[in-house]
Amino acid sequence: MSKKSVVIWDGNVRDAALSILLAVDKNQAYSNLLLNETIKRHKIEAKDRALLTEITYGPLQHKMTLDYYLEPFIRGKVDHWVRWLLRISLYQMHYLTRIPAHAAVNEAVEIAKRRGHRGIASTVNGILRSVLRNGVRATGDIADPIERLAIETSHPHWLVQRFIDNYGIDVATAMLHDNNVPPVQTVRVNLTKATVAQAIAELEAEGLTAKQSDVIPECLHITNGQPARTKAFKEGMITIQDESSMIPAKVLNPASGMRVLDMCAAPGGKTTHLAEIMNNEGSILATDLHPHKLDLIDHNTERLGLAIVETAPIDGRKASEFLQAASFDAILVDAPCSGLGVMRRKPDIKYTKREEDLASLQTIQLALLDAATKVLKTNGKLVYSTCTVDKQENEGTVQAFLAAHPEMVAIQLESLPTKLAEKQANGMLQVFPQDFGSDGFFVAAFRKKGESN
């Protein structure tokens, strides 16, 4: 029998998680966007919000592992929604010690009754109680070491192999495991409005716990609460941003009064960081291929009180057709990429990306960099960044770019905190998720040579 139509939220956290995960599968939507939209629309309270987040992300992050555990107990074919219900339930039973296993089973049976019929409920009950009696099988039984690591960390075989080929077994293994660890919640202090100490005091006055990062000085780690609901956020004292995403603006480090281009700017986190570094003096043109996304930048600059940002709907690859040649002092190209560095935030990326996608992305990345050189002044600075950990998209793109542009030279990354400066090599910096609990990120910097150099 096909599943009955259901609403995404009726007060039942597990049912809501199931609806979100089914929508992610059906519509190829990002889990983080659907989750946040559900929480916001239905004003879900803090206790339910935490559990909903955990049992939405957890089964996605560990999907392949959960399927490996379930496989011996499933006889015949089960409906797609039933398989997701089993994954959610087993995730609670195996990974969440604070939830009694029998409670997870009982809840699954009730959901199966509501969405299907008694026969399906009986099947769900039988499978989950068999798991309880017998336990799950060990991954050590998998002979192929790559396949074993793929199942243990729930990453496709091709991705595990690619990471090992890129960085070796030790770095790859640490990264694969860390991709399943929830990210640290971070915010950036708007130094044009407040000092770090003032921002911490304001957040703590509202019941949040905030601590200054020892990597990026204007970054705060938040260990409880929702910074987006605070007075500090509404009044433009802080911006929600992953710590690694703060690196590109720090590297570009534009001086006050400069003319800066942010070529792939939406939603504006890096744009506003650049404006704050420039002390709101000078001019920034923030462009994006999608006009509707520019509204997000405008909204952010208004909230933060930053007046030097102008937006324009321009495809960065065609920048030279719309913008004056050699007219910008500094340019940031935060290019479209595979997103393989942000899988802890968007675990669905692991299963939707294909290896062949990466080559086509490099074509776009090189086109953006090529266009940037045309509108960059002589001696101007260009920064290229991605939120991926793939060598082809990162080092490979840099090498191809420099080979095609003898007028550009790689330069040392400046204005980096000591912890990051030590990691750079040949004008490039690769940050891994395991380095300091942030997203995987890549940054490279170049200077446009003059005729005499």
Image (cartoon, rainbow, N blue to C red):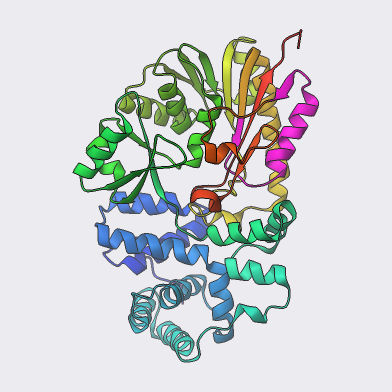
Furthest toward the left, the residue is 205
User: Does residue 260 appear to the left or right of 111 in the view shown?
Assistant: right
Quarter of the image for residue 429 reads top right
Picture coordinates of residue 2, whole percent (x, y):
46, 73
Quarter of the image for residue 227 reads top left
For the residue pair 359 and 409, the one nearer the viewer reads as 409
Residue drawn at x 52%, y 71% is 80
Picture coordinates of residue 25, whole percent (x, y):
52, 60
Can residue 384 be seen? yes
For the residue pair 36 and 19, the one nearer the viewer reads as 36
**Magenta span contains residue 307:** no
Q: Is residue 143 above or below residue 224?
A: below
Picture coordinates of residue 246, whole percent (x, y):
48, 35
Query: How many circles with numbers are drawn on the protein?
Result: 0
Q: Quadrant of the C terminus?
A: top right
Residue drawn at x 34%, y 45% is 211
Bounds of the magenta segment: 384-410
Residue drawn at x 48%, y 86% is 131
Q: Is residue 222 above or below residue 371?
A: below
For the residue pair 249 and 345, the one nearer the viewer reads as 249
Can residue 233 be seen? no
Picture coordinates of residue 358, whole percent (x, y):
69, 45
**Magenta span contains residue 395:** yes
User: Does residue 176 appear to the left or right of 258 in the view shown?
Assistant: right
Q: Is residue 52 above or below residue 215?
A: below
